[in-house]
C-alpha cells in the first residue's frame, strides 16, 4: 500500500514537471537583453508637502512593451513622462513625485516596477521624506564683500493681468473644453523681473494631465491633486 502511494506521488511530481516544461516552451524565458537594466537602482527624495520633485530613470532594454508601475503608499504621487512604450535600447523616463498638501511629515516608502512584455522585471525602491518648507535648511554660506561707490535704482509693485474663477476644463473622446486667457503688460518690459500663474484645483478625477501653455509653450503637463 505504501509503495502504491509512493508511485502515485512520483506520477504527480513528473506530471508537474512536464506542465512547467510545456509552459516554458510556450511562453519562453526572457533573454538578457529583455531584462531591464535601470539606473538609478534606488532613489531617495526630500519634498515639501504640496510640492513635487523630478528625476530621470535610465532604462536599457529591448522589448515590444515596457511598463512602469508605481507601488506602495506613495503610488498615487508618482507619474511618468512615458509608459507602455516599445524599446530597442536606452530610454530616459522622467519621474514626477507630487506630495499632496495635507500629507503628514514623515518618511514614506514605495517602489517602481519596470517590466518588459517578455517577462523581465526590475524593482526600484523609492523613499520620500515629506517636510514643511520651514524645516528645510539652507545650505547657503553668508559672505561679506566690500563694494565701491554705486547707485541703486528700482521699481516695486505687482500687477494681476487676468483672473477668473469657477472654470471647468474637460477632455474626452466626445468633449474638448479648454480655457484661454490673455493679458497685456502696458509698462516697460525692462523693469519686469518675475511672473507667475496660480491655479487652484478644486476637483479632478485624476484621469488625465492638466496642460498649461504660455505663448504656445507647454509649461506644465502632469496630473494634479485637488485642494482639500
Image: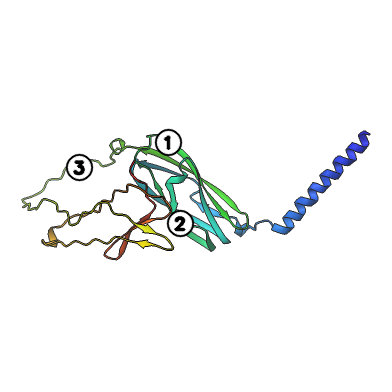
Query: Which percent across, then down, holds residue 73?
Result: 47, 40
Q: CA distance from mark 1 to mark 3?
A: 34 Å
Q: CA distance from mark 3 to mark 2?
A: 39 Å
Mark 3 element type: loop
Question: Which mark identifies residue 143?
Answer: 3
Q: Nearer the viewer, residue 110 or 214?
A: 214
Look at mark 1 in the image and give the residue it sits on: 107
Question: Could you tell me which quadrant the C terminus lies in?
Answer: top left
Q: Nearer the viewer, residue 158 or 60?
A: 158
Q: Earlier in the sequence, mark 2 or mark 1?
A: 2
Q: Please give the name of the residue rendered at 26% of the width and 42% of the height, measured from the top-left corner.
A: 140
Q: Could you tell whether 173 is left or right of 181 in the image?
A: right
Q: Please give the name of the residue rendered at 89% of the width and 37% of the height, measured from the top-left corner.
A: 5
User: Which label lies toward us, 1 or 3?
Assistant: 1
Look at mark 2 in the image and give the residue it sits on: 93
Question: Could you tell me which quadrant the N terminus lies in?
Answer: top right
Q: Please give the name of the residue rendered at 9% of the width and 53% of the height, measured from the top-left corner.
A: 155
- In this view, 226 is above or below 186: above
- In this view, 37 is above or below 101: below
Q: Please give the name of the residue rendered at 54% of the width and 63% of the height, measured from the top-left corner.
A: 86
Q: Could you tell whether 27 is left or right of 161 in the image?
A: right
Q: Earlier in the sequence, mark 3 or mark 2?
A: 2
Amino acid at each position: 500500500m505504501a509503495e502504491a502511494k509512493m508511485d502515485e506521488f512520483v506520477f504527480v511530481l513528473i506530471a508537474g514537471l512536464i506542465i512547467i516544461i510545456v509552459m516554458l516552451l510556450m511562453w519562453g524565458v526572457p533573454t538578457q537583453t529583455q531584462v531591464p537594466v535601470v539606473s538609478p537602482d534606488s532613489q531617495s527624495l526630500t519634498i515639501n508637502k504640496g510640492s513635487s520633485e523630478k528625476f530621470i530613470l535610465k532604462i536599457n532594454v529591448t522589448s515590444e512593451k515596457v511598463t512602469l508601475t508605481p507601488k506602495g503608499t506613495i503610488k498615487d504621487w508618482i507619474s511618468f513622462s512615458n509608459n507602455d512604450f516599445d524599446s530597442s535600447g536606452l530610454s530616459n523616463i522622467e519621474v514626477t513625485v507630487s506630495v499632496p498638501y495635507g500629507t503628514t511629515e514623515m518618511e514614506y516608502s514605495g517602489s517602481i516596477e519596470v517590466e518588459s512584455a517578455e517577462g523581465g522585471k526590475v524593482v526600484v525602491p523609492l523613499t520620500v521624506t515629506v517636510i514643511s518648507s520651514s524645516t528645510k535648511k539652507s545650505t547657503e554660506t553668508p559672505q561679506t564683500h566690500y563694494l565701491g561707490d554705486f547707485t541703486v535704482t528700482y521699481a516695486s509693485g505687482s500687477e494681476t493681468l487676468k483672473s477668473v474663477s469657477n472654470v471647468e476644463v474637460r477632455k474626452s473622446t466626445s468633449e474638448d473644453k479648454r480655457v484661454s486667457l490673455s493679458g497685456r503688460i502696458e509698462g516697460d518690459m525692462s523693469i519686469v523681473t518675475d511672473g507667475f500663474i496660480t491655479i487652484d484645483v478644486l476637483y479632478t478625477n485624476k484621469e488625465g494631465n492638466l496642460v498649461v501653455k504660455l505663448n504656445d509653450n507647454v509649461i506644465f503637463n502632469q496630473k494634479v491633486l485637488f485642494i482639500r
